[in-house]
Image (cartoon, helix red, strand yellow):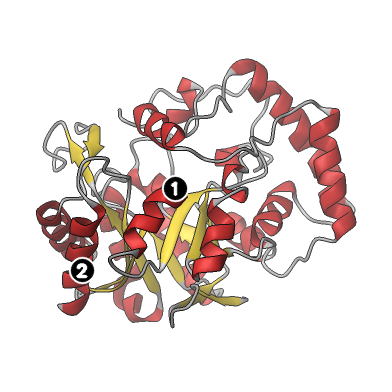
Amino acid sequence: MEKRTFGNTDLTCSAIGFGTWALGLTQYGKIDIDEAVRAIDMAIDHGITLFDTAEAYGPYTSEELLARGLGKRRADIVLVTKVGFVYDNDPAIRGNAAIVRGDASAAHVIERTEGCLERLNTDYVDLMLIHWPDLVTPHEETIGALEDLKAAGKIRHYGVSNYDVGMMTECQKHGSLTANQIGYNLFDRRVERAVLPYCLEQGIGFMAYGSLGFGLLSGGLKPDTEFEENDWRRRGMAFGLPLFERENFLKELRVTERLKEVAGTYDKSVAQLALAWVLSHPAVTVGLVGMRDERELEENIAAADWRLTDADRAEIDRIFVDEDVSTHAGSRQITDITKGLESHAD
């Protein structure tokens, strides 16, 4: 497995990261919990060293299940989690706490970090991220709290998630970001115009979530796919984009079918093509992907060493043009971010 370094830091990890949003169990339909937990141990055996979770996944459930899967292998991996949300109920009541808003105040960040450490059964987190922009708390206060946690040995590095360039610029005035984590895939290229170039210039690592288009690029969705009641995709919106609204969904599936043909010429899957495409951007440190079982694990790993040619990339873009499907290549704005929170708030 290829190893990559986060920007100008000494933090190194596998190019593919294990994403655990589905382990939250409340927003991504049904999964086999035992099989998913076993996949964590198998992933380490296959060279995956970065595992990404968050307090909000559940809330709490993903962190707890990840700790169970890691067991005594915690020291073998780079552990990433996130804080920064306020809920409308006690998150300890599983499935009964909806996100209300972001909160990156110093007191909140420090208090919630302690909870993460307890649930993850660890003394420190390798990379702590602020999950969502707090448009009220000054960035200086947030970074100050993260610096305090770092000085106390509770976290090794810190960063942000879903922050635009203006927000990162303000954060950099008061500290040094190790990473930004934002959605990036063939159907959502908003970060290419400003965020990715900024991360390269500033030596900030970039973590791409949704590398498989939240299932659109997995090859498993069909025109008659019906999302379960607790599946956030059922609402049609994906972080400010109407990717799962009916007309768009059908057009995107046609693109995926044609991408399968491109991947097939290399005896690869469309999921492997999508992941290889994300990893090919020079600013990307790690592509995050969920892995529910050994088959998905092995498929994802096989994408890490695939290098797309310029001709491949041109053909991929040609398919989007032919099918009249947007790549959403404009800049990601604060309005996109706040819309994203609205679409994932319950």
- Alpha carbon separation for disc pair 2 and 1: 32 Å
Relative vertical location of residue 202 with respect to residue 321 in this rendering, above or below: below
Q: Quadrant of residue 344?
A: top left
Q: Secondary structure at mark 2?
A: loop
Nearer the observer, disc 2 or disc 1? 1
According to the picture, the residue beneath numbered tag 2 turns out to be 121
Identify which amino acid the numbered label 2 is placed on.
Asn
According to the picture, the residue beneath numbered tag 1 turns out to be 164
Relative vertical location of residue 37 with respect to residue 45 in this rendering, above or below: above
Q: Which is nearer the eye, 32 or 209?
A: 209
Across and down, in percent, residue 345 comes to: 31, 30
Q: Secondary structure at mark 1?
A: loop
Instruction: Give the quadrant of the N terminus.
Output: bottom right
Across and down, in percent, residue 267 comes to: 84, 57
Residue occupying image coordinates x 28% and y 45%:
56
Relative vertical location of residue 335 with respect to residue 280 in this rendering, above or below: above
Q: Which is nearer the eye, 259 or 46?
A: 259
**Structural crowding at the residue carrying mark 2, measured as other residues with C-alpha within 10 Å and reported as few (<14), some (14–19) or many (≥20):** some
Which residue is situated farthest in the top direction here?
247
Across and down, in percent, residue 47 comes to: 55, 76
Instruction: Give the quadrant of the C terminus.
Output: top left
Across and down, in percent, residue 261 comes to: 86, 43
Residue occupying image coordinates x 18% and y 57%:
141
**Structural crowding at the residue carrying mark 1, measured as other residues with C-alpha within 10 Å and reported as few (<14), some (14–19) or many (≥20):** many
Q: Which is nearer the eye, 22 or 2?
A: 2
Indicate left or right for 300 with 68 as reference: right
Residue 266 visible in the picture: no
The mark nearer the N terminus, 2 or 1, is: 2
Relative vertical location of residue 185 with respect to residue 223 in this rendering, above or below: below
Residue occupying image coordinates x 50% and y 59%:
207
